[in-house]
């Protein structure tokens, strides 16, 4: 009997009972999970969907909306403040159109390689790798495999960045609710001064949530996590309805608000806005899971039109309602009454459960890499240990950057801009350049990538500078109650 090599044993371990959870991600039956997860090139492991559980156009639309609505939406009123009441909504519209165009580019390139290579489906990482292989540059062709690694890297950074944002969001909202609990009333319209009862620092709240989130990510089956997703969707939907119900009432005179904000704060707007629009990683998986993928382009444009309308309306109305006092999350500006305190708690519950869903992506890329390199009897221990360390890492990063607005802007500038703006236009050039491209198309793609790169550099630098030397202290005042 031939001796089993370490690589063979590692592959066998990935196929054991502990890792059959990959079936819950609807991996294509033609491809084993171990093949897609080997050597860290596993972005396809959670993006490859089978045909046995296809979705209707309506289900796909709901998934598209769900994937683009989260904490980034609640930070858009502050983003509009950083750009100005006129420039902010216009910039959101332009950035949304560019982001949707880049999603369309990714879908087009993926279709091109599916047809050319006779493959039923290629994910984001595969598409970039094949695009580099089609490049006229021999150096890019020889290093095409790095395209997949780069996409994996930014996916991991983005998803773990979301998890950091969730830590800060949970701490800020629970801290505010608890500190105002003794004076919370049933009157949501009185303009009264509220003396907060000091409690522990927000960083300690993050540490309080840490063990509960560690236990939550120990759930490794995506079908079980879908139950939490349903709870999160219901609670967040109710919260959004209540937020809109409040901000459309008695909007103050907007004439005192600046039409154009300082250029120094615009990079923070860019980071927050692109953080909110970063849903490009889910485009190809949703299309592949559809019963009739030919309808996906229409669904993409309709769904993103709804998302853009939601973003622009909440960002504009939120800033109009609260003005200069707007905070990193609009929930922190809601009145100090039980109705809107419950809204903060409801949205926080939704974010708490969503943490596990966002964490699933980097965990399914990173965990098998380590598990495949240990003895079989240690696999479960290593699995849970790596998950625990990753959650602790997101908690530590959130503690180091406890300002919600800066965390959102930093994550958006660093990783979301790369996935949503920089890579897709370059992918179109490498894919079609050898086949002939219009000079206008090349110029258009180059301008989009340059825009994304400038936003990446400037947004990151401004967010880090603001973190080191903040220009002003956090604001704790809202329109109906002044927190002293």
Image (spheres, rainbow, N blue to C red):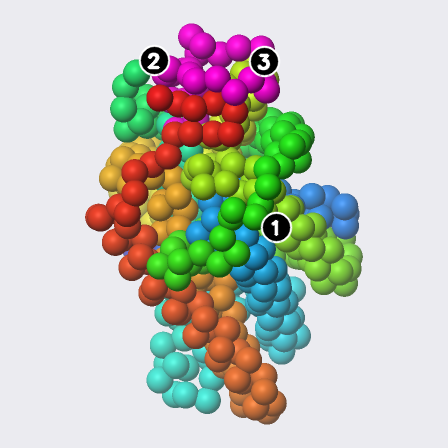
* For residue 239, side relative to residue 40 (left or right): right
Q: Is residue 193 above or below residue 118?
A: above
Q: Position of residue 449 (x, y in %)?
A: 46, 73
- Does residue 233 sit above or below 98 in this rendering? above
Q: Nearer the viewer, residue 367 or 182?
A: 182
Q: Nearer the viewer, residue 215 or 331?
A: 331
Q: Which segment did they paint magenta?
A: 172-196
Q: Residue at x 35, y 84 (%)?
A: 139
Q: CA distance from mark 3 to mark 1?
A: 29 Å
Q: Secondary structure at mark 1?
A: helix
C-alpha separation, residue under disc 2 versus residue under disc 1: 35 Å
Determine the secondary structure under disc 3: loop
Could you tell which of marks 2 and 3 lies nearer the N-terminus?
Answer: 3
Q: Is residue 181 magenta?
A: yes
Q: Which residue is mark 3?
A: 187
The residue wearing badge 2 is 197
Residue count near mark 1 (Cα–Cα under 10 Å), binned few <14, some 14–19, many ≥20: many
Say if mark 2 contacts mark 3, CB within 8 Å: no
Between the residue at mark 2 and the residue at mark 3, the CA separation in whole angstroms equals 19 Å
Measuring 42% from the left and 33% from the top, which residue is drawn there? Answer: 169
Residue 458 visible in the displayed image: yes
The residue located at (58%, 13%) in the rendering is: 187
- The residue that appears at 51% across and 29% down in the rendered structure is 479
Q: Residues within 10 Å of mark 2 (few under 14, many from 20)?
A: few
Q: Is residue 54 magenta?
A: no
Residue found at the very far left of the displayed protein: 468
């Amino acid at each position: 009997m031939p001796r089993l090599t370490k690589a063979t044993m590692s592959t066998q371990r990935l196929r054991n009972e502990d890792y059959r959870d990959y079936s819950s991600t609807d991996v294509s039956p033609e491809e084993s999970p171990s093949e897609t997860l080997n050597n860290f090139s596993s972005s396809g492991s959670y993006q490859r969907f089978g045909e046995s559980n296809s979705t209707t156009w309506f289900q796909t639309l709901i998934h598209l909306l769900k994937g683009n609505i989260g904490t980034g939406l609640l930070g858009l009123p502050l983003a509009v403040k950083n750009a100005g009441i006129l420039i902010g909504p216009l910039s959101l519209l332009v950035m949304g159109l560019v982001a949707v165009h880049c999603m369309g580019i990714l879908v087009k390139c993926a279709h091109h390689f599916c047809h050319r290579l006779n493959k039923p489906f290629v994910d984001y990482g595969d598409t970039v790798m094949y695009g580099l292989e089609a490049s006229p540059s021999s150096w890019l062709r020889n290093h095409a495999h790095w395209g997949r690694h780069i996409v994996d890297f930014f996916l991991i950074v983005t998803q773990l960045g979301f998890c950091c944002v969730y830590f800060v969001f949970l701490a800020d909202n629970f801290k505010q609710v608890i500190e105002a609990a003794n004076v919370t009333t049933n009157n949501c319209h009185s303009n009264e001064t509220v003396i907060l009862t000091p409690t522990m620092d927000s960083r300690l709240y993050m540490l309080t949530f840490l063990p509960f989130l560690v236990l939550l990510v120990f759930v490794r089956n995506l079908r079980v996590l879908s139950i939490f997703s349903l709870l999160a969707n219901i609670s967040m939907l109710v919260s959004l309805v209540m937020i809109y119900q409040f901000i459309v009432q008695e909007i103050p005179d907007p004439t005192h608000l600046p039409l154009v904000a300082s250029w120094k704060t615009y990079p923070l707007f860019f980071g927050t806005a692109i953080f909110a629009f970063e849903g490009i990683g889910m485009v190809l998986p949703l299309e592949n899971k559809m019963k009739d993928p030919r309808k996906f382009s229409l669904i993409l444009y309709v769904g993103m039109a709804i998302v853009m309308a939601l973003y622009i309306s909440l960002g504009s109305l939120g800033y109009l309602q609260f003005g200069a006092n707007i905070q990193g999350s609009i929930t922190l500006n809601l009145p100090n009454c039980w109705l809107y305190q419950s809204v903060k708690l409801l949205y926080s519950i939704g974010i708490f459960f969503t943490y596990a869903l966002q964490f699933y992506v980097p965990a399914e890329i990173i965990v098998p890499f380590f598990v495949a390199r240990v003895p079989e009897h240690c696999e479960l221990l290593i699995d849970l240990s790596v998950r625990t360390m990753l959650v602790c890492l997101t908690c530590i990063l959130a503690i180091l950057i406890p300002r919600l607005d800066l965390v959102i802007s930093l994550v958006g500038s660093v990783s979301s801009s790369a996935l949503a703006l920089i890579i897709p236009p370059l992918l179109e050039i490498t894919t079609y350049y050898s086949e002939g491209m219009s000079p206008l198309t090349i110029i258009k793609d180059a301008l989009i990538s340059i825009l994304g790169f400038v936003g990446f550099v400037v947004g990151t630098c401004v967010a880090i500078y603001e973190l080191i030397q903040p220009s002003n202290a956090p604001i704790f005042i809202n329109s109906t109650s002044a927190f002293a």
